[in-house]
C-alpha cells in the first residue's frame, strides 16, 4: 500500500500548509516523455522518493502506473497527475505537478492531452539506445505544444551507456540543445536531484490571472461510485473551491463543486485549486458522459470568455466486435463500456448483432494494444467473459448506385453484386532500424502490401524507411513480425494517410456447414486462398475435439476454397476407481464443465474465445 | 424408453438412505517399495526394515475395532485393502485381514491389492489363512519394456508366475492392466490381454494411463499429450480390450471391469457404483455415509462436528498422514475433509455412478429420482438416449462408455445446484 510520508521530513502541519495554493512563480507543471522502455516510470518513482512524496519502503515499483494491467505489461496507459513539493537549492519550495503520459504508439492521443496541461517536458533518452522513433515523435509533440524541453539521459549506470553520443543524437536528430542534458539513473537515483533543479530553472512557471473567471481544462476523469465523476484539471485562470457553481463549457451541464484536491499520489483534499495548479474536482455528476476530456470548466454565473483550445480527438482505427459469452451480460457490458469511457474518451461503440454470437458491440480502438487492454479491463474489473472478433478497419465501400458506406464489420459488407469498388485506409509509416535489417524490413513491407517511398540514413547506425501500408496489414501482425525480424531493434511510427482502392473480398468461415458471421473477414483477393488455408488449419488447432466431427471450411461467396476437419473425440472418461473417492471424480467433471463455460456454443460446436482472433495468429509458426 | 418409468417403485432405494451401518470397508496402505512414474495416489516409498508400516497397520487394526464397537460394521459385506502396496506389509497384512474378519464376520469378499514383486508365497499363504478371498494384482502389462517405462519393479515372467501361484492357491484373482502406456502397440496390448486370460484369472480391470500433474511421468512428457496416450489411442485400446476379453470369455460389467462369471465381479467396487455406504480408513481413504451412519461415526469422531442441516449424505476423506496415524491411531485424532450432499445431490450422484455399470440405471433408482427431481430426469434421460450415450434400457452404449464424462456430467447436473458443502474437521 502506498502511504504518504507525513512524519520524517515534513510534519503533518507543515505539509498541509504547503498544500495551500502556491504562487504561480513557484509552480512547475511538466510531463516526462520517452520512447517505450527508456525509463520514464522509474524516473517518476525516483522523483516521488526524493521529494518524500512516498516513503522509500512503501514504494511499489512504478507507482504512477496504477492499473494491474499497466504494472504487468510495464506500460503506462492512463494519464496520472501527481503533486510533489520540492525544496530547491535556492531555499524555496516549489510545487511540481508531474503529469505522467502513456508510452506506446497506440496512445499518442493521451500524450497530446497531457502535454496541453504542462509548461515543460522532461525528454528521457536511454543512454544505451539513443534517440528512437517515439523519442522523435514525442519530442515533436512537446515542441509543437511550445513546451520547455529538459533533456535527460537515463541509465547512465549501465556499462554500455554512451551519453556523449546520445547528446549528439539529441542535437542532430531533434535540434534540441543537449550540452546541459542531465545525466541520470532511474535505477540508482543518481542525477535526480540535478534533474529537479533543472526543472526549476528551465521550465517556465504557469501564466494566468487569479482574479479572472475560472478556466480549467479537463485532462482526465474517473468514476467514483460515491462521488460521481472526478475530473483531473489544470487551472489556467481563476480558482476552484468546494461549493462553487460550475459549468461545462462545451456540453453546458452545471454542477456544484463537491470538493477539490490533488494526488500525492493518494487523493489529498484541498481548500482550493489556484491558478496554474493541477488537481482534481469532484463534480458529483453521476453520468460519465457529461464530463468530457478536453472540455473547459468555468463558473456558472461568471463564465470565462473563451474555452481552452480543444484537444484534437483521437480517431479510432481498429474496430472489433465485443460479445459477452453469456448473452445475459449484454447490459453489463454496455454499462462497463460507459464506465471505461469516463477515463478513456477515445472509446466508441455501436450495437452489433451476430447470428453466431448474439448481441454485442462493435468497438473502435486506437490500436491493437488499446483493444487488448480494454478487453482485459472489461473482463477483470467488471467480471465479464467476452469474445473479441477479428479486428477490422474502416472500409469505404462504393456501391453500384454511387453511394459510399463506411464498413467496420465484415458482416455489413453489401452483396458483391452491389459493390462497385472498395477503398481501404493507408498509413504513412516509418521504421527506424540499423542498416543490417534494412532488407528484412523492406521484404516485410512488400509482404504486407506496402510500398516503400523513401529511405534516409540518419546516421551510420540507423536508417529511416518511409512507406505506405494498408492499416489492415498493420493491425494484424506487422508490428510483431517487425519486432521479431529485426531482433527488436526497429521502432515504428505512423500517421493516418489516404484511402486507396484495393481488390478485396469477404472470406467466410463455415463450421459444421454453417457460416459463422463472427469469423468472417475482409482480405485482398489474391491472398484469399492462402489466408483461408492457414486460417482453417489454425482453427483446427484451436477448436477442441467435439463429440462429432467438425468440418471447417473457408469460402468466398458460395465457393469453398479451403477446408480442414476437427476429428471427433473418441474417448473422454475417467475410468480409474480411486478407492471410491467419488468427490474427486465429481471435481474433475466440474473442472471440465468450467472450461466449457468459457467457450461459445455455435450450433452444436463449442468454440473457444481465441478462435475468433485466430486470424491474428495465422503466421505464428 | 425412459418415459415408461414406474412411479412409486423408488421406495426401496429411498430406504437405503436411512440405513445406519456401512456395507463395505476400505483400508488404505500408503506404502510401496518405489513410487511408479505415473502414480499420484496417496503412497510413498518405504525401506525394508522400516517399523512404520507395522505400526501403521496396527493403528488401522485399532481403528477397525473402534468402528466395530460403534456397531458400524454389523452389516458389512465386503472389505478391500488397497494401496500403495499392501503386500509390502508382509505378515502384518495377515494380522490386519484377520482383525477385519473378526470385527466384521459378515464379510463375504475381502480383497487385497498386491504387486507381483512383493507377493511372496509366505504372504500368499498368510492372507489366505487370515480370510482374504480375493487378490487384485497390479500386473499392468506383460511386456518387459513397457513395465520398465512405468518404473514397475517386476517383469512379465514374475507377474505370470505370481498370478498363477495366486490362482493355484484357490483365491479369486483379478489383474489390473494399463493401456495407452509408453511403447505399447496394438499387438503388445493384445498379448498382454490374452496372456492374463490364459492364466485363468476370473477378473480383469483395464485403465487407460492418466498422466497426472506433478508425477514424474508428467514432467517427462511435458505439455504435449504423447501419441501413445492420445484420446484416440485410449479409445482404441479400450475397445480392443473389450473385444479381446469378450473373446476370452469375460463380460464387461463396468466401464473398467471384466469378469468371467457374475460371481467373479468385484462386489466391493460395485458398492461404490450403487449408492451403498462404505467406510474408508487410512491416509487418503474415502468414505460415503448416510446421515445415520455419520451420526454414529460422530460418537467416536467428535472432531467431525454435527451433520449440517438438510444433508443426506456425507463423503469423507482422511487427510492425516501415515506418520500421524501410526503415532496415534485413535479415530478421534484423525483429520477429515468432509463433503455433504443434499438428497437431490445424492440422487443425481447415484444416477451418475450407476451409468458406469453394464446393467445400467436401476429402475428403482430412476423411479426414486423421478419422484424427487421431477420431469428433468425424463428430459435428461431421453436426451442421453437420443444422443446415443444410453440404450433404451438405460444401459451405457459403447459411446456412453468411451465418452463417460459427458454422460456422467449430464446426470450429475440433475442435482440442480452442483455446489456441495465442504469443510475440514478440527
Image (cartoon, coloured by chain):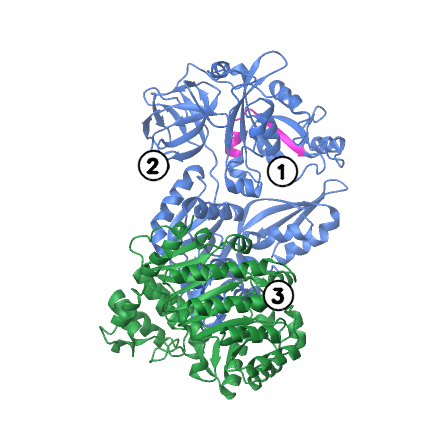
Chain colours: A blue, B green
> In the rendered structure, does residue A124 fall within the stretch colored magenta?
yes
Q: Which residue is mark 2?
A: A287
Q: Residues within 10 Å of mark 1 (few under 14, many from 20)?
A: many
Q: In terms of secondary structure, where does tag 3 sit?
A: loop
Instruction: Using the image, name the chain to which the residue with label 1 belongs.
Output: A
Instruction: Using the image, name the chain to which the residue with label 3 belongs.
Output: B
Q: In terms of secondary structure, where does tag 1 sit?
A: loop
Please provide the residue range marked out in magenta.
A112-125
Left or right: B85 with respect to B289?
Answer: right
Q: Depth check: give the residue in front, A178 or B418.
A: B418
Q: Is residue A338 above or below residue A260?
A: below
- Confirm whether residue A514 shows in the render: yes
Left or right: B35 with respect to B402?
Answer: right
Left or right: A315 with respect to B34?
Answer: left
Left or right: B227 with respect to A324?
Answer: right
Q: Residues within 10 Å of mark 2 (few under 14, many from 20)?
A: few
What quarter of the picture does the N terminus of chain B occupy? Answer: bottom left
As measured in the structure, the alpha-carbon distance from the residue carrying label 2 to the one carrying label 1 is 36 Å
Residue A35: which numbered mark, if any?
Answer: 1
Decide: marks 3, 1 in contact (CB < 8 A)? no
Q: In terms of secondary structure, where does tag 2 sit?
A: loop
Q: Is residue B392 above or below residue A448?
A: below
Q: Residue at x 60, y 67 (%)?
A: B88
As measured in the structure, the alpha-carbon distance from the residue carrying label 2 to the one carrying label 3 is 63 Å
Instruction: Using the image, name the chain to which the residue with label 2 belongs.
Output: A
Q: Depth check: give the residue in front, A405 or A39.
A: A39
Decide: marks 2, 3 in contact (CB < 8 A)? no
Q: Which residue is mark 3?
A: B36
Amino acid at each position: 500500500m502506498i502511504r504518504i510520508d507525513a512524519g520524517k521530513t515534513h510534519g503533518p502541519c507543515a505539509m498541509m500548509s504547503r498544500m495551500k495554493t502556491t504562487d504561480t512563480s513557484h509552480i512547475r507543471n511538466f510531463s516526462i516523455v520517452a520512447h517505450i522502455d527508456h525509463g520514464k516510470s522509474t524516473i517518476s518513482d525516483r522523483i516521488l522518493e526524493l521529494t518524500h512524496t512516498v516513503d522509500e519502503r512503501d514504494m511499489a515499483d512504478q507507482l504512477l502506473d496504477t492499473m494491474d494491467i499497466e504494472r504487468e505489461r510495464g506500460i503506462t496507459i492512463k494519464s496520472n497527475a501527481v503533486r510533489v513539493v520540492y525544496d530547491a537549492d535556492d531555499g524555496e519550495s516549489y510545487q511540481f505537478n508531474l503529469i505522467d503520459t502513456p508510452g506506446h504508439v497506440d496512445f499518442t492521443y493521451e500524450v497530446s492531452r497531457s502535454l496541453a496541461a504542462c509548461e515543460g517536458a522532461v525528454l528521457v533518452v536511454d543512454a544505451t539506445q539513443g534517440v528512437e522513433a517515439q523519442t522523435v515523435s514525442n519530442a515533436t509533440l512537446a515542441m509543437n505544444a511550445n513546451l520547455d524541453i529538459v533533456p535527460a539521459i537515463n541509465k547512465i549506470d549501465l556499462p554500455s551507456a554512451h551519453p556523449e553520443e546520445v547528446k549528439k543524437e539529441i542535437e542532430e536528430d531533434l535540434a534540441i540543445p543537449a550540452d546541459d542534458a542531465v545525466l541520470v539513473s532511474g535505477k540508482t537515483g543518481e542525477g535526480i536531484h540535478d534533474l529537479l533543479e533543472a526543472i526549476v530553472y528551465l521550465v517556465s512557471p504557469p501564466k494566468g490571472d487569479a482574479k479572472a473567471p475560472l478556466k480549467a481544462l479537463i485532462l482526465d476523469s474517473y468514476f467514483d461510485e460515491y462521488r460521481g465523476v472526478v475530473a483531473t484539471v489544470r487551472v489556467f485562470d481563476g480558482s476552484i473551491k468546494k461549493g462553487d457553481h460550475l459549468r461545462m463549457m462545451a456540453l453546458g451541464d452545471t454542477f456544484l463543486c463537491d470538493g477539490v484536491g490533488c494526488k500525492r499520489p493518494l487523493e489529498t483534499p484541498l481548500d482550493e485549486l489556484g491558478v496554474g495548479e493541477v488537481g482534481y474536482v469532484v463534480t458529483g455528476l453521476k453520468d460519465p458522459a457529461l464530463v468530457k476530456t478536453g472540455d473547459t470548466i468555468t463558473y456558472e454565473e461568471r463564465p470565462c470568455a473563451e474555452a481552452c483550445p480543444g484537444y484534437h480527438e483521437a480517431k479510432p482505427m481498429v474496430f472489433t466486435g465485443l460479445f459477452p459469452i453469456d448473452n445475459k451480460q449484454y447490459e453489463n457490458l454496455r454499462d462497463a463500456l460507459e464506465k471505461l469511457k469516463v477515463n478513456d474518451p477515445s472509446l466508441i461503440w455501436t450495437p452489433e448483432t451476430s447470428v453466431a454470437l448474439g448481441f454485442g458491440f462493435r468497438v473502435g480502438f486506437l490500436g491493437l494494444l488499446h483493444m487488448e487492454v480494454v478487453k482485459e479491463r472489461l473482463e477483470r474489473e467488471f467480471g465479464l467473459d467476452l469474445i473479441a472478433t477479428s479486428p477490422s478497419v474502416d472500409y469505404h465501400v462504393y456501391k453500384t448506385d454511387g453511394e459510399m458506406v463506411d464498413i467496420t464489420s465484415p458482416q455489413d459488407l453489401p452483396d458483391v453484386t452491389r459493390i462497385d469498388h472498395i477503398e481501404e485506409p493507408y498509413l504513412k509509416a516509418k521504421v527506424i532500424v540499423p542498416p543490417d535489417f534494412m532488407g528484412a524490413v523492406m521484404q516485410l513491407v512488400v509482404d504486407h502490401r506496402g510500398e516503400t517511398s523513401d529511405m534516409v540514413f540518419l546516421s551510420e547506425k540507423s536508417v529511416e524507411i518511409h512507406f505506405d501500408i494498408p492499416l489492415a496489414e498493420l493491425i494484424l501482425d506487422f508490428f510483431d513480425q517487425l519486432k521479431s525480424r529485426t531482433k527488436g531493434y526497429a521502432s515504428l511510427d505512423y500517421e493516418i494517410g489516404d484511402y486507396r482502392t484495393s481488390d478485396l473480398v469477404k472470406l467466410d468461415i463455415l463450421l459444421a456447414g454453417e457460416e459463422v458471421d463472427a469469423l468472417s473477414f475482409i482480405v485482398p483477393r489474391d491472398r484469399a486462398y492462402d489466408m483461408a488455408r492457414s486460417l482453417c488449419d489454425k482453427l483446427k488447432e484451436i477448436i477442441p475435439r467435439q463429440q462429432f466431427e467438425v468440418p471447417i471450411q473457408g469460402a468466398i461467396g458460395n465457393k469453398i476454397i479451403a477446408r480442414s476437419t476437427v476429428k471427433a473425440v473418441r474417448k473422454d472418461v475417467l475410468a480409474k476407481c480411486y478407492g471410491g473417492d467419488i468427490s474427486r471424480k465429481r471435481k474433475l467433471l466440474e473442472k471440465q464443465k468450467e472450461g466449457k463455460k468459457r467457450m461459445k456454443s455455435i450450433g452444436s460446436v463449442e468454440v473457444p474465445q481465441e478462435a475468433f482472433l485466430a486470424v491474428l495468429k495465422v503466421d505464428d509458426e | 424408453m425412459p418415459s415408461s418409468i414406474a412411479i412409486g417403485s423408488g421406495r426401496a432405494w429411498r430406504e437405503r438412505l436411512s440405513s445406519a451401518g456401512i456395507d463395505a470397508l476400505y483400508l488404505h496402505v500408503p506404502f510401496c517399495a518405489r513410487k511408479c512414474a505415473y502414480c499420484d495416489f496417496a503412497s510413498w516409498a518405504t525401506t525394508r526394515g522400516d517399523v512404520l508400516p507395522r505400526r501403521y497397520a496396527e493403528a488401522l487394526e485399532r481403528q477397525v475395532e473402534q468402528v466395530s464397537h460403534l456397531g458400524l460394521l454389523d452389516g458389512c459385506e465386503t472389505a478391500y485393502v488397497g494401496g500403495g502396496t499392501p503386500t509390502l506389509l508382509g505378515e502384518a497384512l495377515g494380522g490386519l485381514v484377520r482383525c477385519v474378519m473378526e470385527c466384521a464376520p459378515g464379510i463375504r469378499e475381502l480383497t487385497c491389492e498386491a504387486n507381483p514383486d512383493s507377493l511372496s508365497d509366505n504372504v500368499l499363504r498368510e492372507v489366505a489363512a487370515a480370510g482374504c478371498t480375493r487378490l487384485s494384482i497390479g500386473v499392468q502389462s506383460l511386456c518387459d519394456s513397457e513395465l520398465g517405462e512405468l518404473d514397475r519393479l517386476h517383469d512379465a515372467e514374475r507377474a505370470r508366475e505370481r498370478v498363477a501361484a495366486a490362482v493355484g492357491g484357490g483365491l479369486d484373482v483379478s489383474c489390473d492392466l494399463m493401456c495407452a502406456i509408453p511403447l505399447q502397440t496394438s499387438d503388445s496390448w493384445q498379448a498382454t490381454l490374452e496372456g492374463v486370460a490364459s492364466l485363468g484369472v476370473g477378473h480383469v480391470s483395464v485403465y487407460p494411463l492418466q498422466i497426472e500433474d506433478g508425477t514424474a511421468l508428467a514432467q517427462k512428457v511435458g505439455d504435449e499429450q504423447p501419441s501413445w496416450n492420445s484420446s484416440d489411442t485410449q479409445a482404441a485400446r479400450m475397445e480392443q480390450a473389450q473385444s479381446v476379453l469378450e473373446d476370452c470369455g469375460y463380460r464387461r460389467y463396468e466401464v473398467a471391469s471384466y469378469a468371467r462369471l457374475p460371481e467373479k465381479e468385484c462386489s466391493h467396487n460395485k458398492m461404490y457404483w450403487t449408492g451403498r455406504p462404505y467406510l474408508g480408513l487410512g491416509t487418503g481413504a474415502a468414505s460415503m455415509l448416510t446421515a445415520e451412519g455419520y451420526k454414529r461415526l460422530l460418537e467416536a469422531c467428535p472432531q467431525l462436528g454435527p451433520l449440517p442441516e438438510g444433508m443426506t449424505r456425507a463423503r469423507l476423506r482422511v487427510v492425516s498422514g501415515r506418520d500421524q496415524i501410526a503415532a496415534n491411531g485413535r479415530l478421534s485424532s484423525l483429520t477429515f475433509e468432509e463433503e455433504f450432499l443434499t438428497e437431490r445431490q445424492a440422487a443425481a450422484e447415484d444416477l451418475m455412478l450407476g451409468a458406469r455399470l453394464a446393467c445400467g440405471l436401476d429402475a428403482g433408482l430412476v423411479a426414486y429420482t423421478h419422484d424427487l427431481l421431477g420431469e428433468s430426469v425424463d428430459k435428461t434421460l431421453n436426451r442421453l438416449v437420443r444422443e446415443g450415450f444410453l440404450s433404451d434400457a438405460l444401459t451405457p452404449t459403447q459411446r456412453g462408455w468411451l465418452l463417460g464424462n459427458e454422460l456422467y456430467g449430464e446426470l450429475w447436473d440433475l442435482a440442480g445446484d452442483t455446489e456441495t458443502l465442504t469443510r475440514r474437521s478440527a
